[in-house]
Image: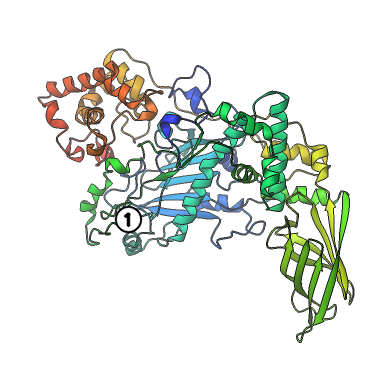
């Protein structure tokens, strides 16, 4: 499922540990031991909507552009077309790649009240010819992403939703999250040559435009943010520790993140430094070599040319007149572009970056829940502070009035209409106050000639300072005015539920308990019962060479899926026959461990994710690899093929592994 951010696999820092005693590839580790994927909640008890346009409509029906309008001005579901990509479905459209591109969806908009958030939590890959959906969606209860497949997704098919083989997915999605290429996104319509070919098809691609760079950028940004969700959860879970000090640490992080989510303003550096001191004390104890941040970016690849990642490289593109048969060879993925390659971390934190951490935790709150909380708090009293203002009000030629006010710590200016003149709303042109957010708007309470009274709003909520206090009212009259602050956020500290048992950041559970304590109705009703989750059977155990291959390679190649080649799927006689047929390519991949990294024609197999913590050098020298290599060599010799000649050939020119589209290049 290599399609959309992840991390240095060998470190395995952020993916959750499988259930105790569950081996890699065991169905027990593929199913979430707690909670469910967000996609389960989207679908509910009914079938997966088909055709794809109906599924897209289902997603859009749960989004609310009015609640939190997209800052980019684009649709809240970002769709990208990739005709020549690196996913397991990359050959499904061959040779007519541009008529049947793969489509990727990422949700980066707010959901309606009563709906669980999907922003940065739902990613879908769809290939029409492959008749499969690949889904990555967030599990709030575990704080991790789940991987699912919808099989037989086609006209007349019986769409089946199952949890995917997690070990297979993590081979490329090394942080257990979506992945995507870094700029210039040349596999997408951001590449003018790709866009031109898609437009030439003159087909409606599910309503997704076949061009533009903006969509690829915002899709990339969504995957970047999604990859950090497991990081924030890991720090929340392990950074604070256990006992009373750990509980106090989590309480402090929850409160600080909630203040940030409500106000939109980070606290000053000195205040940040005082948040959750337990985290500072434990950091080097828990992560003595630092905490690695995941790398969600695949190398940029231009499938129609040879443009490299080096921005200084001269871009050269293949001619547009290539026919589909010639394009079939472009499905091959050179080793340096393989999603299987381990990716070094983007950065290593040797100390907690609390600004980044609190911003990440704050992003886990749903906008609809924040609106309900803000309304509930505003109905409660709190300590009141009134700041006196000196104001000058001037009549304007168009009938409105302008104002400028100055007081202790605050300076502001704007315009408002008279009571008789309804032309336009009140506007705040400048508001300078430490800890106040940008973009405050005014909503009139009353506009008699004097005084005028306004609520201060920030988006769909009351404007608040970084410390949580509400900017309750602004009154203006000729000569003087006042700004009223109310500390209603103090109720949060008084009513905050215990987070002692919270092993994941309790954005929803904690919010629901808090709202209940404030006598407010939670924005989300209890979830209706979902059908039982389904998963593939575990990897089959077998004796002899077949068993040796299944033990190491079965999590990826003993599945019902057509890709990657499932030569280990079936009874022992079927598998023996398939191993013989696939022997040239198996031998080639196993041999790549003996080739210098910069000279490899393909990424070696099995990938690092299947080595269970063993480093590359130890695996290359291991008796187990030699045993697998010897068996593949024996199969070649029995067919009259010299194994030594295999590695000197291009991988794409080796005999096809399995019939049908599995024989396409790159498999």
Residue 597 visible in the picture: yes
* Mark 1, secondary structure of its residue: loop
Q: For label 1, count other residues whose C-alpha is less than 10 Å away and answer few (under 14), some (14-19) or many (20+).
A: many
**Residue 607 percent across, percent down from the top left:** 34, 30
Relative vertical location of residue 402 with respect to residue 557 in this rendering, above or below? below
Out of 547 and 447, give the one closest to the viewer.
447
Out of 51 and 289, give the one closest to the viewer.
289
Quarter of the image where the N terminus is located? top left
Q: Residue at x 73, y 31 (%)?
A: 248
Residue 543 is drawn in which quadrant? top left
Residue labelled with disc 1: 98
Q: Residue at x 51, y 25 (%)?
A: 17
Q: Residue at x 67, y 41 (%)?
A: 273
Residue 65 is drawn in which quadrant? bottom right
Q: Residue at x 37, y 33 (%)?
A: 561
Describe residue 61's horizontal placement relative to residue 633 as left or right. Answer: right
Relative vertical location of residue 252 with respect to residue 569 in this rendering, above or below? below
Relative vertical location of residue 20 with respect to residue 472 in this rendering, above or below? above
Relative vertical location of residue 430 with respect to residue 47 in this rendering, above or below? below
**Residue 187 percent across, percent down from the top left:** 35, 53
């Amino acid at each position: 499922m290599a399609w959309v951010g992840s991390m240095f696999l060998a470190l395995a820092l952020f993916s959750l540990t499988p259930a105790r005693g569950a081996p890699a590839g065991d169905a027990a580790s593929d199913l979430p031991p707690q909670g469910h994927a967000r996609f389960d909640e989207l679908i509910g008890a009914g079938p997966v909507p088909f055709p794809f346009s109906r599924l897209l409509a289902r997603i859009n029906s749960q989004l609310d552009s009015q609640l939190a309008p997209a800052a980019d001005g684009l649709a809240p579901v970002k769709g990208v077309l990739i005709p020549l990509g690196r996913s397991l479905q990359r050959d499904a459209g061959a040779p007519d790649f541009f008529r049947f591109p793969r489509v990727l969806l990422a949700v980066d908009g707010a959901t309606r009240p009563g709906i669980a958030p999907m922003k940065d939590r739902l990613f879908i890959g769809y290939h029409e010819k492959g008749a499969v959906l690949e889904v990555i969606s967030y599990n709030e209860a575990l704080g991790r992403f789940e991987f699912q497949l919808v099989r037989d997704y086609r006209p007349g098919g019986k769409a089946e939703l199952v949890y995917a083989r997690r070990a297979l997915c993590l081979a490329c999605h090394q942080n257990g999250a979506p992945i995507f290429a870094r700029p210039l996104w040349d596999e997408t319509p951001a590449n003018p040559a790709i866009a031109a070919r898609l437009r030439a098809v003159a087909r409606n691609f599910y309503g997704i435009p076949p061009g533009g760079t903006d969509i690829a950028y915002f899709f990339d940004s969504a995957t970047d943010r999604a990859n950090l969700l497991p990081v924030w959860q890991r720090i929340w879970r392990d950074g604070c520790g256990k006992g009373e000090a750990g509980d106090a640490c989590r309480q402090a992080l929850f409160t600080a993140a909630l203040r940030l989510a409500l106000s939109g303003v980070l606290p000053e550096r000195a205040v940040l430094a005082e948040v959750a001191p337990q985290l500072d004390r434990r950091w080097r104890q828990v992560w003595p070599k630092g905490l690695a941040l995941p790398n969600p970016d695949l190398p940029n690849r231009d499938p129609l040319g040879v443009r490299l990642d080096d921005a200084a490289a001269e871009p050269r593109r293949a001619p547009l007149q290539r026919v589909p048969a010639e394009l079939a060879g472009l499905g091959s993925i050179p080793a340096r572009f393989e999603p299987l390659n381990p990716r070094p971390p983007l950065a290593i934190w040797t100390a907690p970056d609390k600004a980044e951490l609190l911003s990440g935790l704050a992003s886990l709150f749903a906008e609809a829940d924040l609106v309900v909380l803000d309304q509930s708090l505003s109905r409660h009293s709190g300590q009141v502070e009134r700041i006196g203002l000196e104001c000058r009000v001037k009549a304007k030629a168009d009938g409105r009035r302008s104002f400028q006010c100055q007081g202790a710590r605050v300076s502001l200016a704007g315009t408002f209409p008279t009571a008789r003149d309804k032309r336009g709303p009140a506007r705040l042109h400048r508001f300078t106050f430490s800890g106040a957010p940008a973009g405050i708007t005014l909503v009139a309470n009353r506009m008699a000639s004097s005084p005028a009274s306004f609520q201060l709003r920030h988006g769909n909520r009351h404007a608040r300072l970084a410390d949580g206090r509400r900017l309750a009212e602004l009154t203006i009259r000729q000569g003087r005015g006042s700004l009223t602050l109310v500390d209603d956020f103090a109720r949060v500290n008084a009513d905050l539920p215990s987070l002692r048992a919270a092993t994941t950041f309790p954005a929803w559970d904690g919010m629901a308990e808090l709202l209940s304590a404030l006598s407010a109705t939670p924005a989300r009703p209890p979830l209706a019962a979902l059908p039982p989750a389904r998963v593939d059977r575990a990897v089959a155990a077998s004796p002899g060479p077949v068993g040796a291959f299944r033990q190491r390679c079965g999590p990826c190649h003993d599945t019902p899926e057509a890709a990657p080649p499932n030569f280990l799927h079936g009874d022992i006689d079927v598998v023996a026959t398939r191993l013989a047929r696939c022997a040239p390519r198996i031998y080639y991949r196993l041999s790549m461990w003996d080739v210098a990294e910069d000279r490899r024609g393909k990424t070696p197999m099995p990938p690092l994710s299947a080595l269970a913590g063993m480093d590359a050098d130890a695996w290359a020298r291991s008796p187990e690899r030699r045993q697998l290599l010897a068996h593949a060599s024996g199969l070649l010799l029995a067919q009259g093929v010299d194994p030594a000649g295999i590695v000197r050939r291009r991988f794409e020119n080796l005999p096809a592994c399995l019939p049908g589209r599995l024989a396409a290049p790159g498999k």
